[in-house]
Amino acid sequence: MTPQQSVSDLKGVSQHLSYVAFFSYRVNADGSLVPIEDSEALAAAKKSGAIPMMVITNFTEGNFSPDIAHRIFTDKTASKSLINGVIQTMKAKGYKALNIDFEHIREKDRELYNGFLETILPQVRKAGFTVSTALAPKTSDEQRGPWHGAHDYKRHGELADFVILMTYEWGWSGGPPMAVSPIPQVRKVLDYAVSVIPRNKIVMGAPLYGYDWTLPYKKGGKFAKRIAPAEAADLAAKEGVEIQYDNEAQAPWFRYTDDQNKTHEVWFENEQSMQAKFNLVKEYGLNGVAYWVLGEPFPQNWTLLEKEFIIQRH
């Protein structure tokens, strides 16, 4: 993404946000950071009154790397170098908050990840910054596998100022057509989260996008295309099809036929589906909502957000 694109993504929305997260500073195996061109967008975020949040990830070559995570957790020199680099970067650039988004970690590295957090979080906090982590959507501590196993909800809740639950991507580009963030599934994650993490430390993830699938869906076939909510609504109007609403998932969807005579199924977000998510935040007494991802037009969301919540500005 270009620096200009980042600035344009913030236009008109950053005044509705407490934090703007910059995704992402990628961590190398030796603990050094791959820098991003964030100066212009940082200036725009600060001007709008949102707190800039630095995000660090174990992302490399198009995916999250279990090897990089393992190396950082086990190599004291790399870990120390990373912590120093993070604090120096935050001070130099004017970041005020840090989010650690390590994903696809080996399940057996769970205690090592906790140990790394026990080392980095107090140091970053001592330097005067807010610290948070990103958590895969789990419904119990027993949930295993590379995306969930190493994420210890209870420990993250004890160590971080707050956690962000990635409660989206049930419907994803490589999977079958369905709602990106269906309410029953989100509810199960929240039920578990509030049982082990203080509610005022939980921020619920919400998607600002949808997907357009070409039917019939074939596993390993063509990936669905990401679509902005405003774009999806325009597409339904252009194709002259009625938008349906799934009352269980609490999400809008529709089908249309393209110029090649192929049928498509689109799932996205609208005012009604966001209201359902905001209702969850209130019902569970959570700290707020975290959006993924800016740059997908959805004006109704921001109007609704202002109506439903008092947005903390620092």
Image (spheres, helix red, strand yellow):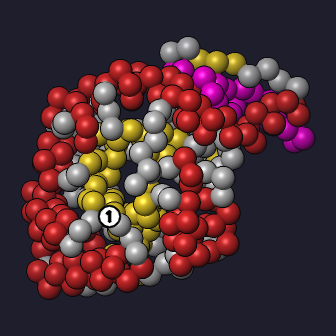
Q: Is residue 226 above or below residue 102?
A: above
Magenta-tinted stretch: 249-272
In the rendered structure, which amino acid carries the disc numbered 1?
A: Leu
Tell me which residue sits at (44%, 68%) in the image. 24
Tell me which residue sits at (48%, 58%) in the image. 50
- Quarter of the figure that contains the N terminus: bottom right
Where residue 202 sits in the image (x, y, percent)? 29, 40
Tell me which residue sits at (79%, 20%) in the image. 242
Q: Is residue 269 above or below residue 224?
A: above
Where residue 14 sits in the image (x, y, percent)? 56, 54
Regarding residue 148, the answer to whether it shows in the image is yes
**In-image side of 252 versus 149 (left or right):** right
Q: Is residue 237 above or below residue 226?
A: above
**Residue 108 included in the magenta stretch of the image:** no
**Residue 267 included in the magenta stretch of the image:** yes
**In-image side of 305 versus 110 (left or right):** right
**In-image side of 163 versus 1 (left or right):** left
Tell me which residue sits at (18%, 45%) in the image. 157
| Numbered disc 1: secondary structure | strand
- Quarter of the figure that contains the C terminus: bottom left
Regarding residue 120, the answer to whether it shows in the image is no
| Residue picked out by circle 1 | 98
How crowded is the residue under tag 1: few (<14 C-alpha within 10 Å), some, or many (20+)? many
Where residue 220 sits in the image (x, y, percent)? 55, 48
Q: Is residue 244 above or below residue 298?
A: above
Direction top: furthest residue? 247
Where residue 44 sits in the image (x, y, percent)? 58, 67
Front in this rendered view, residue 201 or 111: 201
- The count of marks equals 1
